């Protein structure tokens, strides 16, 4: 399993917009091959109310690659880039980390 985690920082109002956008994007992301998409907010730890994480899982690295191909070719992604730029500094996309489970059986 592959997990992609995108970290967002911003004001509470900015992160509320990211939450709404994540909710709206979920079905499209799942149609492109993502699984278990969710927007997580910390209740303890670093960042507090100023951080959120959009997380999706993929069955394989090739499934993640196919998702990325669909994402980057989409009108949705072009609009998201404009929305993020317009929302700065209320919201900032800090980047995406792609991980695998090193202890999976």
Image (cartoon, rainbow, N blue to C red):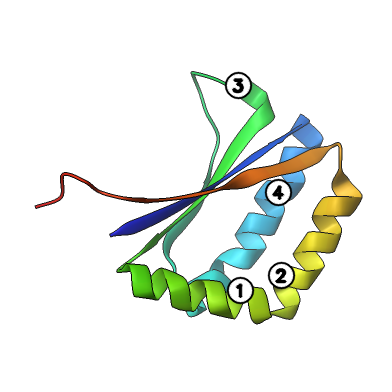
Instruction: Residue under label 2, please give it.
Output: 77
* Quadrant, the N terminus: bottom left
Secondary structure under badge 1? helix
What residue lies at 52% left-to-right and 28% top-to-bottom? 42
How far from the left and from the top, in percent, is residue 29? 54, 70
Secondary structure under badge 3? helix
Question: Could you tell me how far apart the alpha carbons at marks 2 and 4 are, in whole angstroms?
Answer: 14 Å
Q: Which tag, 3 or 1, sits closer to the chain's start?
A: 3
Q: Nearer the viewer, mark 2 or mark 3?
A: 2
How far from the left and from the top, in percent, is residue 91? 78, 40
Quick one: label 2, few (<14), some, or many (20+) residues within 10 Å? Answer: few
Question: Could you tell me how far apart the alpha carbons at marks 3 and 1 are, in whole angstroms?
Answer: 29 Å
Q: Which tag, 2 or 4, sits closer to the chain's start?
A: 4
Residue 101 shows in the view: yes
Question: Could you tell me how far apart the alpha carbons at marks 1 and 2 are, in whole angstroms?
Answer: 6 Å
How far from the left and from the top, in percent, is residue 86? 91, 52
Q: Which tag, 1 or 4, sits closer to the chain's start?
A: 4
How far from the left and from the top, in percent, is residue 8? 65, 41
What residue lies at 76% left-to-right and 48% top-to-bottom? 17
Question: Could you tell me how far apart the alpha carbons at marks 2 and 3 are, in whole angstroms?
Answer: 27 Å
Q: Nearer the viewer, mark 2 or mark 4?
A: 2
| Observer-nearest of 10 and 96 | 96
> Is 103 situated left or right of 54 in this image?
left
Tell me, yes or no, whether the two marked residues, 1 and 4, touch with CB atoms within 8 Å.
no
What residue lies at 78% left-to-right and 30% top-to-bottom? 11
Tell me, yes or no, whether the two marked residues, 1 and 2, touch with CB atoms within 8 Å.
yes
Image height check: is 6 above or below 34? above
Instruction: Residue under label 3, please give it.
Output: 48
Q: Which of the numbered marks, if any, corresponds to residue 71?
A: 1
Tell me, yes or no, whether the two marked residues, 2 and 3, touch with CB atoms within 8 Å.
no
């Amino acid at each position: 399993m592959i997990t992609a985690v995108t970290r967002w920082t911003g004001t509470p109002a900015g992160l509320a917009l990211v939450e709404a956008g994540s909710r709206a994007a979920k079905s499209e992301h799942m149609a492109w091959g993502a699984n278990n998409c969710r927007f997580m907010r910390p209740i303890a730890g670093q960042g507090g109310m100023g951080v959120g994480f959009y997380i999706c899982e993929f069955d394989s690295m090739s499934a993640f690659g196919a998702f990325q191909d669909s994402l980057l070719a989409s009108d949705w992604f072009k609009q998201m880039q404009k929305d993020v730029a317009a929302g700065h500094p209320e919201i900032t996309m800090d980047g995406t980390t792609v991980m695998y489970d090193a202890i999976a059986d």
